[in-house]
Image: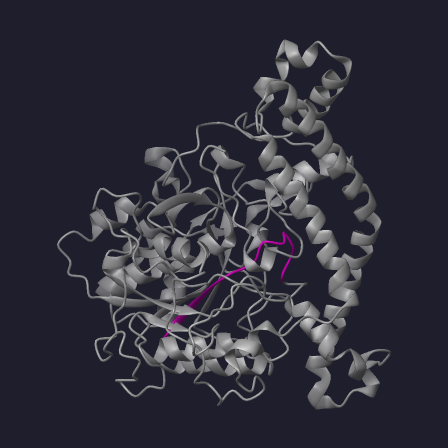
Amino acid sequence: MSGIVYCYDNFELVRMKSAFYIILVCALLSVGTTHSQDTVKPKKHGWHLLDHQRDGYRGISLSQAYELLKGRKATPVIVAVIDSGIDTMHEDLKSILWVNDKEIGGNGKDDDKNGYPDDIYGWNFCGAKTGENLDRNSHEIARVYHNWKSAFENKSNKDIPADQQFLYSQWKRADSLIERDYKEAKTSIGNATRFLTGLEESGKMICSVLSVSQFTVSQLNNPLITGRPATKRAADFWTTIFNQVPDTSITSTFVLEDIRKYKNNLDANIKRKEEPPIDLRGQLTKDNYTDINDRFYGNSNLKQGSGNHGTAVSGVIAATRNNNMGMEGIADNVRILAVRAVPGGDEHDKDVALAIRYAVDNGAKIINMSFGKPVSPYKHFVDDAVRYAQSKGVLLVHGSGNEGVDVSKQPFYPNPTFLDGKIASNYLTVGASGDESNGGIAATFSNYGNAVVDIFAPGVYIYTTATNNGYEAVDGTSFASPVVAGVAALLKSYFPSLTPEQLVQIICTSGTLIEVSVKVPGTTDQEVSFKTLSTTGRIVNAHEAVKLALAMEKK
């Protein structure tokens, strides 16, 4: 696949919004979607760091930023990554990890008396004290739907007490989303099952004739295949499928796995309404979830079963620079503090709130949050944690989500708007931009909103770290967010007196203004000015941010 890995963020799992995935499935199910992709120049590892004028890619002009900073001293900045965990032994990350020097690793004791024993590199709120970890989880819409169904079903606003109105609104949205996905799944499951069966049977036929375990489109012209009516029909069928994707290295195995994922997702959407989810988290953590003060649970295991997500996010921010390995992070004097609060599936509000507090209490000045969900029943926990971070001068950077929707109209959590209507001043919401080489300036999957999303940043084909000393190219606002967090860390490192509010001002004001029309994310033909997709209409630019910080310093 030319090194491309489409990363399904936790907030993507319900709808499976990978660009390739939707294109392929729509083609297979004959709903009329066609695929086209501009290829003005080749895809390039590390394009997101480059300069548009000098290099031809719509990156963040990082080299130019460092040119302005030559001779200036940097101070270390702790950046917390609240995510799925991290590979603490990765060759490009281990030297930039935060280390709790008040703890003695591996002795099973809480040496610094903070309630979290052996938290050398951070903490895991998704595990048991015995070390077992939560690597998969139910979706929040299912938890909210079933938890409050008996209390809210068939009720209207007038039936609900004032102190439960927000929770009721969350249940109504969960009910709507569950019902939407259920109806779609019920409608599609029969065709998907039949189609998958046809794919499997025709694929086996081709593999048998060619004596292979999988095949690509180039192998379908073999006379052994084209010379027989049955195999020729199978080959024509598969050729139509392969032609939906320009990458000729795609294998039949990959296609089958993706269609199985699609069918499994339909099955899951049916089950999600019909059966209450199992409380996998509660079985491990054994805390009282409704009590925010019951906070000493989890373990120090950040790596085992963590997957690639948190490792990839961390690499974007601060993978060791100039070491002739894999790739380079953005900030050169950062320590990554890993906090594990995001399992496969939606995170819990309490875990997120405590993760923010843990990060703040351990010195983080910037917190990256590449996760999210459409409902947040205990939002007040998170609101209080955001206020706590604000009071301690900590900036929060959050990905806008990958549903291709306007989050001004369809809220995505966490967000900076508190339940009382006030808005956090230490918060940036980031959409994903791309380049002409990888599909266009606005990422097709990115959430947007001219009242909510502050700025866009590269989030398509971002080459970064993966577990076990690996590297991969990934897509998602999950990777646009750490681009902005990395720029914020760079600024904070070289201009340590900057407040979160000043960082927000600099980043949003100095970004590159994009004055062109783009396709609205999540649509195939609707076009708008890029400026309407966020509050600023800009893409983050490290060079211009540093230039502005220098100018502010002289005043």
555 or 378: nearer the viewer: 378
Question: Visible in this render: residue 194?
Answer: yes
Q: Main secondary structure of the magenta part?
A: loop
Q: Residue at 68% of width from left, 70% of height from top?
A: 277
Counting from the top left corner in percent of width and height, residue 124 is at 42, 72
Figure colour scheme: one colour
Q: State which quadrant residue 45 falls in.
A: top left
* Above/below status of 48 relative to 547: above
In the rendered image, residue 319 lying in the magenta stretch gets the answer no
Residue displayed at 38% across by 69% down: 301
**Residue 493 % position (x, y):** 25, 64
Instruction: Say left or right for 202 vs 407.
Output: right
Is residue 33 in sight in this rendering?
A: no
User: What's the residue at 56%, 47% (across, down)?
Assistant: 530
Residue 242 vs residue 107, the one in the foreground: 107
Q: Which residues are magenta?
A: 394-407
Q: Nearer the viewer, residue 513 or 486?
A: 486
Q: Position of residue 350 (x, y in %)?
A: 53, 79
Q: Is residue 396 magenta?
A: yes
Number of labelled discs?
0
Residue 518: quarter of image: top right
Q: Position of residue 474 (x, y in %)?
A: 47, 46
Q: Residue furthest left?
A: 71
Q: Which image quarter is the C terminus in?
A: bottom left
Q: In the figure, 15 relative to 297: above or below?
A: above
Would residue 260 appear left or right of 485 to someone viewing this image? right
